[in-house]
């Protein structure tokens, strides 16, 4: 009786393990059932021979191991994959991202900039929503904050001190304002510019972007944009003073390169930044969106990002169905060109 239960247990385990056969398709039930049944029947016979063979049972157990080696390897691979990259079993809500973006727009409209930046950072870190739309929103918020530093009544005395060349006094006043909660973002950006342009201390400006006692002076969502501004201000200081145009017409600065000229000289990142800035300023221009998708698809070999841009265009009410169909046709054309 004990041998019978042993054979039954081995057979049951074999049937369960047969479900991990990598050759099972899941489309043809009869073929899959037959494959599992044959493998399980062979296991049952080998188990019976092992019980009857006595000292020779080890050879039959080795045969069982060979029969189930591939299934065991598949089971082990799946367990390892779940440990390394566990599945997200949260319920998918396709409308959640729309609600989040609506909430983001409401926070901006109400002037709750800190909360809007927190939500932007959360969506970017979780890879939810349109990366381009979030980048455009962050850029617009940053530019508005930077512009408000020139208009805020609270910073009027600071601007006057800077105009008079009283930089230490302006620095002390800005630090005093920043010490008061909540963090004054325009004051922080104005101090960044004061350090970089007026005091020739970009190192102190960059130090403001580092967290102090786990509390950053500037919101983390603005950190990268602020770092770019510091670099731009440094380059602005390094540029030689322009010669008067009336005395020397040749001293006129050369015109800014167009997007097509940037692409010809392989300045792809600059072209992308230029197009993203144009879209952020006016998202209704179809040609800018299409050109941005073309840069990613043709020049950066990133068809996935190009497809995401066209999906975003489709969700934007600014474009007609004919324009969307034209954009999709161009995407198919780019995909064929990459093959």
Image: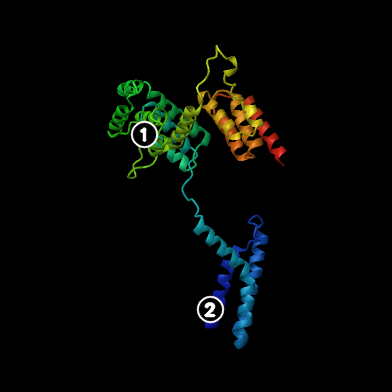
Specify whether residue 1 is in view.
no
Residue 330 spot, x, y in % from top left: 67, 31
The residues tagged by marks 2 and 1 sit, at their Cα atoms, a distance apart of: 67 Å
Residue 221 spot, x, y in % from top left: 42, 37
Among the two numbered marks 2 and 1 on one chain, the one whose residue lies closer to the N terminus: 2
Q: Which residue reaches farthest front?
A: 247
Horizontal side of 111 relative to 259 (left or right) equals left
Rendered view: 217 above or below 70: above
Quarter of the C terminus within the rendering? top right
Q: Residue at x 55, y 60 (%)?
A: 78
Helix, strand or loop under label 1: helix
Horizontal side of 176 relative to 17 (left or right) equals left
Q: Residue at x 58, y 36 (%)?
A: 308
Rendered view: 150 above or below 228: above
Q: Residue at x 56, y 75 (%)?
A: 10
Q: Quadrant of residue 182?
A: top left
Horizontal side of 13 relative to 178 (left or right) equals right
Camera-side residue of 19 and 115: 115
Q: Quadrant of residue 248?
A: top right
Residue 77 spot, x, y in % from top left: 57, 62
Rendered view: 298 above or below 82: above
Disc 2, disc 1: CB below 8 Å? Answer: no
Q: What color scheme is it?
A: rainbow
Q: Which residue reaches farthest top?
A: 246
Foreground disc of the pair 2, 1: 1
Helix, strand or loop under label 2: helix
Specify few, some or many for label 2: CA neighbours under 10 Å numbering under 14, 14-19, or 20 or more. few
What residue did someone put label 2 on?
5
What residue did someone put label 1 on?
114
Q: Residue at x 55, y 64 (%)?
A: 76
Rendered view: 54 above or below 28: below
Camera-side residue of 54 and 76: 76
């Amino acid at each position: 009786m004990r041998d019978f239960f042993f054979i039954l247990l081995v057979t049951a385990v074999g049937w369960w393990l047969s479900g991990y056969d990598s050759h099972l398709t899941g489309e043809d039930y009869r073929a899959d059932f037959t494959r599992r049944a044959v493998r399980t029947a062979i296991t049952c016979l080998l188990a019976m021979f092992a019980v009857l063979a006595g000292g020779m049972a080890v050879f039959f157990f080795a045969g069982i191991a060979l029969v189930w080696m591939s299934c065991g390897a598949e089971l082990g691979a799946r367990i390892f994959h779940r440990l390394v990259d566990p599945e997200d079993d949260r319920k998918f809500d396709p409308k959640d991202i729309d609600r989040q973006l609506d909430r983001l727009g409401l926070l901006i409209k109400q002037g709750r900039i800190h909360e809007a930046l927190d939500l932007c950072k959360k969506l970017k870190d979780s890879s939810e929503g349109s990366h381009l739309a979030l980048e455009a929103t962050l850029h617009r918020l940053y530019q508005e904050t930077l512009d408000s530093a020139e208009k805020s009544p609270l910073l009027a005395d600071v601007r006057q001190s800077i105009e008079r060349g009283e930089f230490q006094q302006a620095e002390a006043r800005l630090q005093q304002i920043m010490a008061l909660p909540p963090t004054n973002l325009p004051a922080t950006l104005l101090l960044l510019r004061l350090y970089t342009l007026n005091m020739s201390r970009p190192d102190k400006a960059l130090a403001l972007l580092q967290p102090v006692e786990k509390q950053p002076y500037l919101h983390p969502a603005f950190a990268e944009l602020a770092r770019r501004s510091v670099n731009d201000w440094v380059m602005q200081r390094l540029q030689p003073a322009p010669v008067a145009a009336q005395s020397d017409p040749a001293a006129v600065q050369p015109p800014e390169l167009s997007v097509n000229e940037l692409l010809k000289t392989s300045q792809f990142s600059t072209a992308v930044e230029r197009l993203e800035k144009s879209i952020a300023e006016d998202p209704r221009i179809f040609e800018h969106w299409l050109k941005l998708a073309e840069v990613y698809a043709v020049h950066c070999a990133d068809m996935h990002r190009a497809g995401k841009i066209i999906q975003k265009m489709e969700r934007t009410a600014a474009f007609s169905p004919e324009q969307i169909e034209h954009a999709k046709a161009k995407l198919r054309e780019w995909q064929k060109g990459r093959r």
